Image: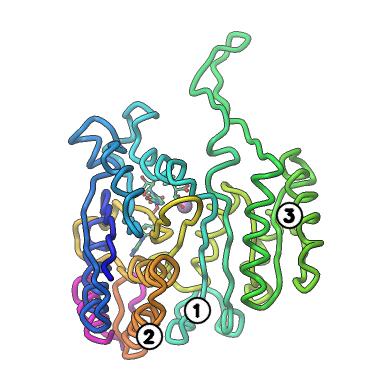
């Protein structure tokens, strides 16, 4: 059995972290005889510089033809002034749309070894284990937009938020199915006290909930949810929410786990699934070799589990990460006195050796 994996390093720290994840995947391949083949493709600012487009058709085709996509990150100040339609971020947005990746699963779990690192009190984060199920190809991200127009003599811009019942139904179903395999609780997050799209969201989720009587379901407004994540993260099992709220809440939830560099994600839908850390291209540390590769390494483990059904190999990678942390190795984002500070490639090697 052989598997074809498309690797898209992208921009900034993208190359450093995907190099790390591929090295760990190769260690798992060696141990479990998976037969992994890797093919590299361009996207983001790097692709824009080479081809004049952030998402070459060849990259889309390669993703569609492969068994799983490992994505680093895109974006950077260098491309802030380019035509908005050609911004590096268009690459990941376009890939999500092209591959029909309607759901983004962002698990947040606090490694025992990192409980002391969270800016939240240890007694609050101990046992926190939640997953954000973020709708990924709808909402305000993909609604009609206007970059600039004159209206009554003043310049304005706008983005329209819209959601349809089928779009909300499919993400809600996935959230309930996910909760059934976990602790059986779904929290749906919206702003239905203000937004029409949120009112449709809430009534659709409540309708889907009726098909899952075994799953407890509650609603929170997004502003309260943002507070509750900091006040009591252990109250959450599955959080289901729209594209923009899910983006913001997942960066906030990352803090529970100590560093945004730790968090992986899986984007699933109609075609090949895509796996990427939740963080961006981190221009402030790019090229220094100090980025935390663990979010990408754990994304690679999710690829093995969900796309290739190679459970044992995925478990081995996750256990290797826990072991490296338990032994006290830390990249600078998580380092403090008394621990061993390592860079990206050292952390990668340490994890690979423990797979
Ligand atoms: P960011 O996630 O890149 O960085 C935020 C902060 O977290 C920075 O201080 C950074 O150094 C730190 N950080 C992020 N990942 C880290 C890691 N692995 N190890 C250690 N520290 C890490 O967010 P930003 O600065 O708002 O955005 C930078 C660029 O990335 C922008 O162009 C943005 O559009 C893009 N972005 C891309 C993606 C993606 O490709 N999926 C996701 C988010 C942001
Ligand atoms: C993420 C990022 C992207 C998003 C950007 C880069 C388009 O922030 O994956 O979380 O907003 O979805
Ligand atoms: Mn984000």
Q: Which residue is mark 3?
A: 221
Q: Measured along the vertical axis of the image, is residue 57 above or below residue 328?
A: above
Q: Is residue 29 above or below residue 62?
A: below
Question: Is 240 displayed left or right of 291 in the figure?
Answer: right
Q: Is residue 131 above or below residue 159?
A: below
**104 with respect to 212 (left or right):** left
Residue shown at 55% from the left, 75% from the top: 120
* Crowd band around label 1 with a 10 angstrom C-alpha radius: few (<14), some (14–19), many (20+): many
Q: Position of residue 294 (x, y in %)?
A: 34, 71
Q: In the rendered view, would you say 31 is above or below 99?
A: below
Label whose residue precedes the other's in the sequence (1 or 2): 1
Q: Residue at x 42, y 73 (%)?
A: 309
Q: Which residue is mark 1?
A: 110
Distance from disc 3 to disc 2, alpha carbons, whole Å, reads 36 Å
Q: Are marks 3 and 1 in contact (CB under 8 Å)?
A: no
Q: Position of residue 4 (x, y in %)?
A: 27, 60
Dot 1 falls on a residue whose secondary structure is loop
Q: Which mark is residue 280?
A: none
Q: Which residues are magenta?
A: 333-355
Element at label 2? helix
Question: Which residue is identified by label 2?
Answer: 319
Contact between marks 1 and 2 (CB within 8 A): the answer is no
**Left or right for 71, reference 175:** left
Disc 3: residue Cβ within 8 A of ligand 3's nearest atom: no
Residue at image position (34%, 65%) is 296
């Amino acid at each position: 059995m052989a598997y074809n994996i498309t690797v898209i390093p992208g921009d900034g720290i993208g190359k450093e972290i995907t190099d790390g994840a591929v090295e760990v995947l190769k260690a798992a391949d060696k141990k479990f005889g998976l037969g992994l083949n890797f093919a590299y493709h361009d996207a983001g600012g790097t692709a824009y510089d080479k081809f004049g487009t952030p998402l070459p058709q060849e990259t889309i085709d390669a993703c569609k033809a492969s068994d799983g996509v490992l994505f680093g990150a895109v974006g950077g100040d260098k491309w802030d002034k380019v035509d908005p339609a050609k911004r590096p971020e268009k690459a990941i947005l376009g890939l999500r749309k092209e591959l029909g990746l309607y759901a983004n699963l962002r698990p947040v779990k606090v490694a025992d070894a990192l409980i002391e690192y969270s800016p939240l009190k240890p007694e609050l984060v101990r046992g926190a284990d939640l997953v954000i199920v973020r709708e990924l190809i709808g909402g305000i991200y993909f609604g009609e937009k206007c970059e600039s127009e004159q209206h009554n003599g003043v310049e304005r811009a706008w983005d329209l938020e819209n959601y349809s019942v089928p779009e909300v139904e499919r993400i809600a179903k996935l959230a309930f199915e996910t909760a059934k395999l976990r602790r059986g609780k779904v929290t749906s997050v919206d702003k239905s006290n203000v937004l029409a799209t949120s009112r449709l969201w809430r009534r659709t989720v409540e309708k889907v909930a009726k098909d899952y009587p075994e799953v407890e379901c509650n609603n929170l407004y997004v502003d309260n949810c943002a507070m509750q994540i900091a006040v009591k993260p252990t109250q959450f099992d599955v959080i289901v929410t729209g594209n923009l709220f899910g983006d913001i809440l997942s960066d906030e939830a990352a803090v529970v786990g100590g560093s945004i560099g730790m968090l992986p994600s899986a984007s699933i839908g109609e075609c090949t699934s895509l796996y990427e850390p939740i963080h961006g291209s981190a221009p402030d540390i790019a090229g220094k070799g100090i980025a935390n590769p663990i979010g990408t390494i754990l994304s690679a483990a999710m690829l093995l589990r969900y796309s290739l059904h190679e459970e044992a190999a995925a478990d081995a990678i996750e256990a290797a990460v826990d072991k490296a942390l338990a032994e006290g190795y830390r990249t600078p984002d998580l380092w403090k006195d008394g621990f061993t500070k390592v860079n990206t490639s050292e952390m990668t090697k340490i994890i690979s050796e423990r797979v």
